[in-house]
Image: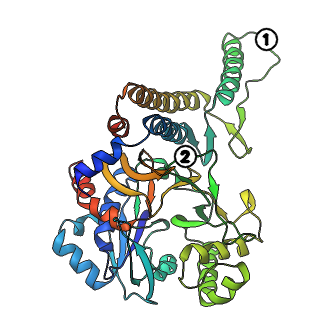
Amino acid sequence: MRGMLMFAHNNDLFDYGKMAYASALSAIHHIGKPISIVTDHATWEKLLSEYPRAMFTFDHAILIDHQNTHQRHFDLADGSTKKAKYHNTSRLDAYELSPYDETLLIDTDVLIQDTSLQHVWGSSAYVRMNHEISELVLGSDNTQIKLSDKSLTTFWATICYFRKCKVTEDFFALSKYVKHHYEYYGSLHGFPISIVRVDYIMTVAAHIMSGYVSGSKSVVEPLPVEDTVFAWNRDIMIDFDEDRTTFLTKSNGRPFPVSTYRTVHCMNKDSMLNMADRIIDTYAIL
Amino acid sequence: MEQSELDALIAAADKRAVYVNQVEHAKAKFRSLNVLYWEGHIFELNQGFLSYLYIKYMEWLSTRERHLEGKSIDIPLEPVILLDKNEEPVQITDLNRFIEEVEECHTEALNYYHDTYTALKLSRTTSELIEVG
């Protein structure tokens, strides 16, 4: 059985349930597989009270108590920042919680705008994540970011495919081990430990399991399209239409609007939430 | 942000730079579409691959035709082997179906790119450029 999975826990600042609903509709439209949500009671009840149809959008609602709350700064659409609670580490339980044999784990701030992820199913790889990213203002090459200057290349857990098997089970178990020793791995690889980031945890686990090699010898292989488009915090979503999302960013000190036609990871959650109702309305009528 | 404020910011952008960037985005989407997924393998349908594929296809068709005509021929009709994106050899057992899927995928990607590129070229303002797609 194949399906998608999202984690959503509201905090004082953002309605992650609503963001997950918008993102899930885009994923179902383009990938055409069932999607389940892992959430907490409060987030789920709020979502259903505002969007009753969400009950039928999600294949399963898996209710858990979120754990390991910590604080971080979030960028807002007007350029300011605010500190709020952040619940993200339950994503490491995705292996146990997923009701599917093959799972596509997607962040709530990802808008799926193409069908390339349909080709991930039946994969020979155990786990697939990208480590290449591209930005909205396209430069010469795609970018790989390292955990620190001379450290490991980051894998982005934003979109993660895995199939249930012993190797993947070990990968998630190792990820939890890395999380448990986050401070040690942070000092070893030189990344900041103030925020527990799943990307960092999975990066360390992936490199350990692969014997610190990359490419085709790695346990973690790339997704069908090998780079993920990132809209950074400075990139504000200003418009949305089916298969096209428009952002306002800056280039050489001047405003720079960009429309992307590909799946995009929207780091500025505030601006994505401002557009969430339009996204929901667009996919609701398709 | 008010719509009027947004419109003013968009109007202040460098239209030529936005055009170049939008063409790059269309090209990136074209590349993501111009890929055939075949029995767990990935084939990038670039022009080099397509040229090689059609040469092999012509050879295969010609050999098959001679076999069908019952002519005496030393060359056996064997499945074609191609290298995928990761340089792994893939035996294509149903070459006709493979060619059909390649053509469908490549044509769809090219049509998308052509339509988007043409619409971008015809856009007169920055607002029009970012509404293409």
Residue A86: which quarter of the image? bottom left
Instruction: Determine whether A225 is above or below B109 in the image.
Output: below
Question: What residue lies at 66% left-to-right and 83% top-to-bottom?
Answer: A186
Of residues B107 and A259, the one nearer the viewer is A259
Quarter-wise, where is residue A187 in the image?
bottom right
Residue drawn 34% across the image and 67% down it: A270
Looking at the rendering, in which quadrant would you find the N terminus of chain B? bottom left
* A155 left or right of A285 in image: right
Q: Position of residue A252 (x, y in %)?
A: 52, 49
Q: Is residue A253 left or right of residue B127?
A: right
Which secondary structure lies at badge 1? loop
Q: Residues within 10 Å of mark 2 (few under 14, many from 20)?
A: some
Q: Which mark is residue B72?
A: 1
Label 1 crowding class (10 Å Cα cut-off): few <14, some 14-19, many 20+?
few
Mark 2 element type? loop
Q: Which residue is label 2 attached to?
A: A138
Nearer to me, B74 or A48: A48
A4 sits left or right of A10 in the view: right
Which is nearer the eye, A196 or B99? A196
Amino acid found under the numbered disc labelled 2? Leu
- Amino acid beneath label 1: Ser
Q: Quadrant of residue B130?
A: top left
Residue A98 position in % (x across, y down)? 45, 74
Mark 1 and mark 2: Cα distance apart in space: 58 Å
At x 73% / y 62%, what residue is drawn?
Answer: A214
Q: Which mark is residue A72?
A: none
Height in image: B99 above or below A239? above
Chain of the residue that carries numbered disc 2 in the rendered image: A
Viewer-proximal residue among A155 and B16: B16
Marked residue chain, label 1: B
